Image (cartoon, coloured by chain):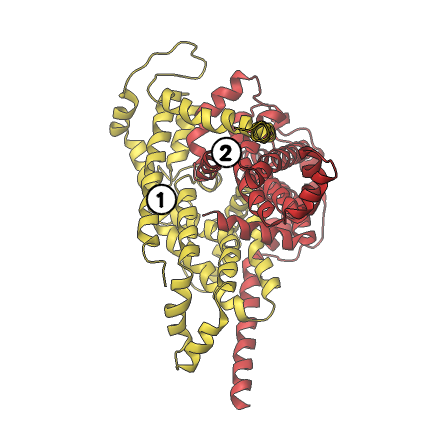
Chain colours: A yellow, B red
Amino acid sequence: MTARRRRQTATAYLFLLPGLLLFAVFRVYPLLEGLRLSFTNARLGRAAYQFVGLANYTRLLEDARFQVSLWNTGFYTLASTLPVLAVPLGLAVALNRGALRNVLRSAFFFPFTLSVVTVGLTWLWLLDPVVGPFNYYLRALGLPARSWLADPATAMWAIIATTVWWVTGYYLVIYLAGLQDIPRELYEAAALDGAGSGHAFLAITLPLLRPVLLFVVVTHVIGSFQIFGQVFVLTDGGPGDATRTAVQHLYETAFKNFFQFGAASAMAWVLFAIILVFSVLQFRLLRGHTEY
Amino acid sequence: MARRRRVDGQSLALTAALLVLAAVWLLPIVWVVATSLKETAHIVRLPPEWIPWPVTGDHYREVLFSSSRTARIGRAFVNSVVVALGTVASVVVTSAMAAYPLARWRFPGRSAIFTLLVGSLMLPNAVVLVPQYVLVQRLGWLSTYQGMIVPEAAVTFAFGVFLLRQFFLTIPGELEDAARIDGANAWQVFSRIVLPLSQPVLAALAIFAFRSAWNDFLWPLIAVNRPEMFPLPVALALLRSAYSSESYGPIMAGAALSALPLLVVFVVANRRIVEGVRLSGLKG
């Protein structure tokens, strides 16, 4: 290495130093430390702890509540993916060519600027079984009112609806950016060939949006596996354990009821493994035929 | 001609339908604001009253200044401002400094570092919750501003590097060469040429970091246990359990207050927000 190259390398690392230090201490180290903790019986306030091998992991196989919470998380992820993909996509296609595009985009985007707690409190009030406006208008229309959040059959769906309302604006902006990149001539050519707008959507829009769809699905699925705030505010996991999710169970195991850091770390790594598998699967499934 | 008019009629109908849908979409927010301004007796009245009359500021006064509750929204508001601004400053400084050499210079380890940072964007935050708590506890940072700011900044740092590096790559190198010939050193080139040219993307990153720090919930819920240090989302969530469920007035006043700063940013810098989100979509 020449003296000049060596100096440039030193300068580069000086620039990188603060950020890399932050990243190493607060991202890389906790990840590895979590893996180590998952093989121990560490607890909050317990200074000395032992390695217990795979005990935390094998115990998860018998932990019925953890399994229920994983199942609920999986259900939430599966059931919310289609609406989270389709609602903003439909809006984006409708908004893309029309007037008032930016005003409408802003309106739909606004809920996404709110915190999950604000969103949760808003819907808690809207869905209030006795004095909430949602049930009032249902009754006015002659439809059955119910305690949406206290009924095991509907509680998770109410959480999904809340989430769709919250995140639609975010994905709408991303879809609109993707639609802008599709050359207009393709649609004009299709129209000349006599293709209807439905056919053009299937033949042009969807295939060319594939990378954007991949991004939306992967982002949403990674986020969904970690759902916590909506549940914490709206149902606290109830009724019973009907909406208990994996991160909520992890939170309670580590910080609320038992302060078992070892067991919670094992849950975190199981969750991490599941998220990794799903992400890789989605990349494989959706990437395959991007060439068009 | 006839065909043209039909199409116009169609798009007019579509726009009208979308306007109605957008209005319905925002109704929950109208409901929150209306509730927060109603007298307590009016809040639970049916049919729902969408226009608060008479208007009262009592609920705002109560959540902001009353000291009788465990979670004081006024104090929490200040905490959130400190945490969000601290995070923005940390993220912008560290990301810009790290992104510059990654965009401009060749040096050993460059692509490995960049790959590691981009890969970490997929890392689920829930996975590091417990060890991060242990770390922050060992540092003595529980219930402190730095205990909220630094971990939050570490999450957004990698995204910031990605975003800024993309932008730095688009700046033509001639300006920097000229400055270097005039005797400027690397730091001067970076701080006097590159940063001023990057103001739009720095603003987009600042807004992105502000939003995620302002709204973060799970980490401060764990890392803060002294009520006077709660940020807004935690204080709000606990405010809910402090009141009986009929007391929606103060809770909705707190919710409306928590939405205010981002509403202002949103109105003032709408384009930057959209740009930031759009760019975040490119990371996949």
- Mark 2 neighbour class, 10 Å CA radius: few under 14, some 14 to 19, many 20 or more: some
Q: Judge by depth and name the residue closer to the eye, B35 or A112.
A: A112
- Kindly identify the amino acid type of the residue bearing the numbered disc 2: Leu
The single residue placed furthest to the bottom in the displayed view is B1
**Where residue A260 sits: x, y (%)?**
38, 20
**Where residue B110 sits: x, y (%)?**
50, 35
- Kindly identify the amino acid type of the residue bearing the numbered disc 1: Ser
Residue to which mark 1 is pinned? A279
- Mark 1 neighbour class, 10 Å CA radius: few under 14, some 14 to 19, many 20 or more: some
The single residue placed furthest to the front in the displayed view is A2
Which quarter of the picture shows residue B194?
A: top right
Residue to which mark 2 is pinned? B218
Residue pictured at 51% horizontal, 61% vertical: A176
Label 2 SS: helix
What chain letter is assigned to the residue under label 1?
Answer: A
Which of the labelled discs sits on residue A210, or is there none?
none
What chain letter is assigned to the residue under label 2?
Answer: B
How much space separates mark 2 and mark 1, taking CA atoms?
23 Å
Which quarter of the picture shows residue A32?
A: top left
Residue pictured at 29% horizontal, 35% vertical: A67
Quadrant that contains the N terminus of chain B: bottom right
Q: Judge by depth and name the residue closer to the eye, B19 or B162.
A: B162
**Where residue A205 sits: x, y (%)?**
42, 66
Between disc 2 and disc 1, the foreground one is: 1
- Asked whether residue A66 is in view, the answer is yes
The single residue placed furthest to the top in the displayed view is A48
A241 to A10, vertically: above or below: below
The reply, left or right, for residue A195 in relation to residue B21 is left
